[in-house]
Image (tube, grey):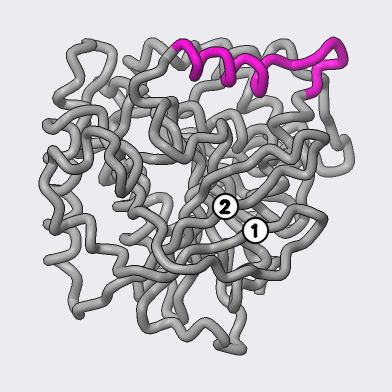
């Protein structure tokens, strides 16, 4: 799938942060998170000497810029965000370089002693350089009703794309995707786990973040890291959410079960395991009914509480306004489904973080 997103070019000298495990990371200087809104669509839809490609084309960029601007104008106060490119490494033999982006509220002082939640956004098949994800990150850190004391958002990189090559080099993307998502003979995806763990470690090391209060949201291809995170059984992860998340190949994964905690889907939140929300469309050709059923069963077998919202007359990419310009009939923005899924997201995050304090 092809959402729309942008990454502001790194400027200034990197600031080195202490990092868990052995993966080093460095951030660029902090910049206004909404500075993208002053750019023309043509500045975002092609790579340049100053930064990566952030959108599929001009129409894609224009659609997200319009939605983001409207969102910012509706805020009750003039909250703003700051963002910084962050280069971090996977703790594997190759020390794979990953290119993320950190968002936090401009009002949030970096050395604030109070601990605040951290959220990870896992990207679609368009890669991490997607203006759509910048918009969602900016929206989350400025949601004062949901996060009165603020939050920190990491747009994670699963494929190692710092230039936005995933927008145009689909052959390279498919090669990387297969190397990460196809399970080995034992049904494990160790490379994916490594990249997920690097994201958790990087976010947890950010100033102010409570390492025990983590949530992850995945879009399209981002459904895979959400499912894998549940399989990894990371105690600090309290909420897992997918939007038009794909689960192809789930039948080849090793069976993971916790018979002591196995539950059926319920609207009641649980502690000790992630609460999972799967938002999907009935007319999404990329999310097979069997794959969805197997993924849901796996979430529940692990001991998660998994709720599925299956929207009628809803296709792939329904959260992204730019998908109305996608020439494929498989994609379409659905304002009603998007609104309901985002409302459910806010409700789950609010309840889960309060419950696990």
**Residue under the point 60% across and 37% down:** 226
Horizontal arrangement in the rendering, residue 278 relative to residue 323 (left or right): right
**Residue under the point 18% across and 64% down:** 72
Which quarter of the figure is the N terminus placed in?
top left
Q: Position of residue 79 (x, y in %)?
A: 26, 76
Q: Which mark is residue 330?
A: none
Residues shaded magenta:
171-188
Which quarter of the figure is the C terminus placed in?
bottom right
- Residue that carries the numbered disc 1 in the rendered image: 25
- Residue that carries the numbered disc 2 in the rendered image: 87
Viewer-nearest residue: 149 or 109: 109
What secondary structure do most residues of the magenta stretch adopt? helix
Q: Quadrant of residue 10?
A: bottom left
Q: Within 10 Å of the Cα at label 2, are there few (<14), some (14-19), or many (20+) other Cα atoms?
A: many
Residue 172 within the magenta-colored segment of the rendering: yes
74 is higher (above) or lower (below) than 42? below
């Amino acid at each position: 799938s092809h959402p729309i997103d942008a990454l502001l070019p790194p400027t200034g000298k990197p600031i080195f942060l202490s990092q868990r495990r052995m993966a080093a990371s460095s951030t660029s200087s902090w910049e206004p998170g909404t500075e993208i809104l002053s750019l023309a669509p043509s500045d975002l839809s092609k790579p340049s000497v100053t930064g990566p490609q952030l959108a599929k084309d001009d129409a894609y960029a224009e659609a997200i810029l319009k939605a983001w601007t409207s969102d910012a104008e509706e805020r009750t106060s003039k909250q703003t965000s700051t963002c910084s490119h962050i280069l971090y490494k996977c703790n594997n033999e190759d020390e794979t370089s990953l290119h993320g982006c950190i968002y936090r509220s401009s009002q949030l002082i970096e050395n604030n002693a109070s601990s605040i939640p951290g959220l990870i956004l896992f990207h679609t098949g368009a890669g991490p350089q997607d203006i759509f994800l910048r918009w969602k990150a900016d929206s989350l850190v400025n949601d004062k009703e949901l996060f009165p004391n603020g939050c920190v958002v990491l747009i994670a990189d699963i494929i190692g794309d710092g230039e936005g090559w995933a927008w145009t080099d689909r052959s390279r993307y498919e090669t990387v995707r297969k190397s990460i998502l196809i399970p080995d003979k034992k049904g494990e995806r160790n490379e994916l786990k490594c990249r997920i763990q690097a994201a958790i470690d990087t976010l947890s090391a950010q100033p102010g973040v409570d390492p025990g209060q983590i949530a992850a949201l995945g879009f399209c291809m981002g459904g895979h890291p959400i499912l894998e995170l549940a399989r990894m059984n990371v105690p600090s992860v309290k909420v897992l959410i997918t939007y038009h998340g794909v689960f192809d190949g789930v039948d080849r994964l090793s069976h993971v079960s916790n018979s002591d905690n196995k539950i059926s889907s319920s609207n009641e939140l649980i502690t000790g395991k992630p609460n999972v929300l799967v938002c999907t469309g009935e007319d999404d050709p990329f999310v097979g009914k069997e794959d969805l059923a197997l993924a849901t069963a796996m979430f529940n077998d692990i001991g998660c509480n998994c709720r599925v919202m299956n929207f009628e007359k809803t296709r792939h990419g329904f959260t992204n306004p730019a998908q109305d310009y996608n020439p494929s009939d498989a994609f379409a923005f659905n304002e009603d489904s998007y609104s309901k899924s985002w409302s459910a997201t806010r409700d789950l995050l609010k309840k889960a973080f309060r419950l696990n304090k």
